[in-house]
Amino acid sequence: MSRSLCLTRRCLGLVTRIECAVRPLSGESGLWTLICAAGIAGSQPTAVKAQGPFHGPFVAESVLDAIAENLVVMGYEESVEPSIWCLHIQAELRRVNATRGRCLSDCQFHPES
């Protein structure tokens, strides 16, 4: 099991690239997320999506493995090239952590209301 993966597919002279990474969410909650960035190689990703939260890294990695298996069936191949969209993935992780923090603090019980 890997905590990051890069897959590519050549089609009509273009190379489509998908980078995925399993990352821990902030805090000591034991929650993890899977973030994927996709687009044309050599440019900015056109989509960055997060899935989860998952309880532990092994659950998130099993989801990553299942996604990779499906993409291989669709013609994608694992690439050994280094990650080029790690900053986009990191920015999405920050956004997810900020959203989680806001939801946790906004969900307060106010019986006097």
Image (cartoon, rainbow, N blue to C red):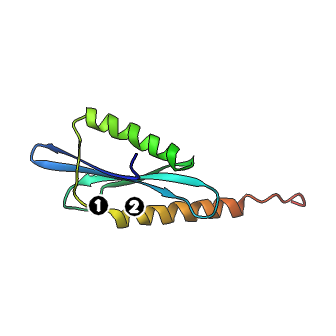
Quarter assignment of residue 29: bottom right
| Location of residue 50 in the rendering, given as x and y in whole percent from the top left corner | 46, 52
What amino acid type is highlighted by mark number 1? Ser
Q: Identify the residue position indicated by label 1 in the image.
A: 83
The image's mark for residue 89 is 2
| Location of residue 24 in the rendering, given as x and y in whole percent from the top left corner | 52, 58
Which of the image's four quarters has the C terminus?
Answer: bottom right
The residue at the far right in this view is: 112
**Mark toward the viewer: 1 or 2:** 1
Q: Nearer the viewer, residue 98 or 90?
A: 90
> What is the secondary structure assignment of the residue under circle 2?
helix
| Location of residue 83 in the rendering, given as x and y in whole percent from the top left corner | 29, 61
Q: Residue at x 90, y 61 (%)?
A: 112
52 relative to 73, above or below: below
Which of the image's four quarters has the N terminus?
Answer: top left
Q: Residue at x 62, y 64 (%)?
A: 27
